[in-house]
């Protein structure tokens, strides 16, 4: 079950639950927090002659459904790049999925891909915030540009990865959360994204690395 393998972090008086299903849950607000779904990316690739199955996106939505069923949030907040490209058939799959959760509030803090998308958000029952959205003690943005002295910044955009090395020159790059004094960097929710390991790493940051349905802490 998504969410059954979790770990908790704490900021001020608040708890955030990090899930191996690539999302965080804020119990006090009954809020599920994630970033970088990139819906429509598989359709974009198919339109350019690259055969990518719609099953990739459907698996992402199935994992999101599992998180909703497990945590039972009242709202889902997406810290940017909900969509990847202009309208394609993948959007219809998402629209049908959204109808299954009509009572669930959906909030989008727009990312660089979303800002160029002519999407009817009202038709999808999605509320769009400004580029900076604060619910103290958290500050939601898509791309981290600077620390907030009063609130923990929660962002996506980077698609962070963590290299694990083993014997015989074996290595594996895995998605992760990165948590430091003023910042929580979320993993890309979509499995159909690359991973970045060259992002600026803050001193003392903790990495919560995801492998299958497990989450492990590394410093």
Image (cartoon, grey):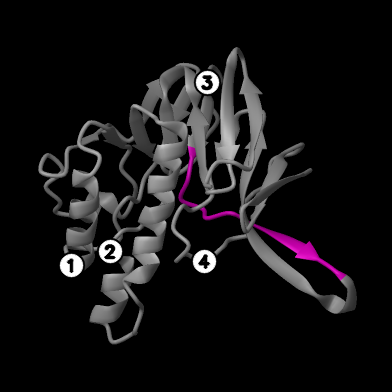
How far is the residue under mark 3 from the one under mark 2?
32 Å
Residue located beneath label 3 in the image: 151
Q: Which residue is mark 2?
A: 40
Residue at the extreme right = 167
Residue nearer the viewer, 51 or 214: 214
What is the magenta range?
Answer: 155-166
N-terminal label among 4 and 3: 3
Q: CA distance from mark 4 to mark 2?
A: 16 Å
Q: Are marks 2 and 1 in contact (CB under 8 Å)?
A: yes
For the residue carrying disc 1, how many other residues have a C-alpha within 10 Å: few (<14), some (14-19), or many (20+)? some
Q: Secondary structure at mark 2?
A: loop
User: What's the distance in space between the residues labelled 2 and 1, CA to CA?
Assistant: 6 Å
Marks 4 and 2, the one that precedes in the sequence: 2
In terms of sequence position, does the residue under pointer 4 or pointer 1 come before the other? Answer: 1
Report x, y in % for residue 69. 41, 39
Q: Earlier in the sequence, mark 2 or mark 1?
A: 2
Q: Report if the CB atoms under discs 3 and 2 are less than 8 Å apart.
A: no
Question: Mark 1 sits on what residue?
Answer: 88
How far apart are the alpha carbons under marks 3 and 1? 37 Å
Q: Is residue 145 magenta?
A: no
Where 62 falls versus 184 (above or below)? below
Q: Residues within 10 Å of mark 3 (few under 14, many from 20)?
A: some
């Amino acid at each position: 079950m998504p969410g059954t393998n979790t770990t908790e972090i704490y900021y001020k008086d608040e708890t955030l639950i990090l899930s191996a299903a690539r999302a965080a849950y804020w119990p006090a607000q009954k809020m599920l927090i994630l970033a970088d779904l990139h819906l429509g990316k598989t359709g974009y690739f198919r339109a350019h002659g690259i055969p990518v199955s719609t099953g990739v996106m459907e698996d992402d939505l199935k994992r999101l459904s599992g998180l909703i069923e497990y945590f039972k949030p009242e709202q889902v907040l997406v810290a940017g790049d909900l969509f990847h490209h202009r309208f394609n058939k993948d959007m219809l799959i998402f629209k049908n999925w959204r109808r299954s959760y009509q009572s669930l509030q959906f909030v989008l803090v727009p990312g660089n891909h979303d800002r160029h998308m002519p999407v009817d958000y009202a038709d999808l029952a999605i509320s769009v915030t400004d580029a900076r959205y604060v619910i103290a003690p958290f500050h939601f943005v898509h791309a981290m540009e600077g620390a907030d002295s009063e609130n923990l910044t929660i962002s996506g955009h980077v698609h962070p990865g963590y290299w694990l090395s083993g014997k015989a020159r074996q290595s594996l790059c895995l998605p992760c959360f990165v948590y430091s004094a003023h910042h929580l960097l979320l993993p890309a929710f979509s499995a159909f994204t690359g991973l970045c390991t060259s992002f600026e790493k803050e001193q003392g940051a903790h990495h919560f690395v995801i492998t299958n349905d497990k989450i492990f802490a590394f410093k």
